[in-house]
Image (spheres, helix red, strand yellow):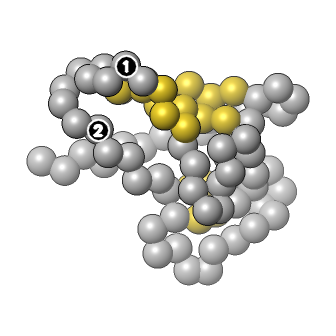
Amino acid sequence: DSATFTSGASGTAVALTDADNPADDVFNSTVSGAGRDPASTNTLGFDADTFAVTVYGGGPLSLEVSSPSDAIRLGVITLSVPV
């Protein structure tokens, strides 16, 4: 499973990954992110994580998710942009 984002400014795809979500298994049934306490594992298919993404410049931002073997249904995607 993987999730990548692409910024219009750079045009380069970047994998969403961190210590709790390896690049090849980002949808791994964890609940983690910025100060989450308690962090949960093995949530029987539910996955909710926070990633810090830095994008410089303007342009569109796209997200691509894929899995060679699992069905992925995105329920909610949120984006926080400091102004």
Real-space Cα distance between discs 2 and 1?
Answer: 11 Å
For the N terminus, the quadrant is top right
* Residue that appears at 66% across and 44% down: 23
Q: Which residue lies most toward the left here?
A: 83
The residue type indicated by label 1 comes to Gly
In the image, taking residue 45 as reference, residue 8 lies left or right, namely left
- Residue 65 image-quadrant placement: top right
Q: Name the residue under label 1.
A: 11
Q: Which mark is residue 41?
A: none
- Residue 70 image-quadrant placement: top right
* Residue that appears at 56% across and 25% down: 64
In the displayed structure, would residue 42 be above or below residue 47?
A: below
Percent of width and height locating residue 15? 55, 38
Q: Is mark 2 on a helix, strand or loop?
A: loop
Q: Mark 2 points at which residue?
A: 55
Q: Could you tell me if residue 76 is visible in this image?
A: no
> Do the residues bearing badges 2 and 1 touch, measured as CB atoms within 8 Å?
no
In the image, taking residue 13 as reference, residue 7 lies left or right, namely left
Percent of width and height locating residue 81? 24, 45
Q: Could you tell me if residue 5 is visible in this image?
A: yes
* Residue that appears at 82% across and 26% down: 68
The residue type indicated by label 2 comes to Val
The earlier-in-sequence mark between 2 and 1 is: 1
- Residue 69 image-quadrant placement: top right
Task: Assess disc 2: are there few (<14), some (14-19) or many (≥20) residues with their C-alpha within 10 Å of its C-alpha.
Answer: few
* Residue that appears at 12% across and 47% down: 83
Q: What element carries label 1?
A: loop
Question: Front-most of 39 and 57?
Answer: 57
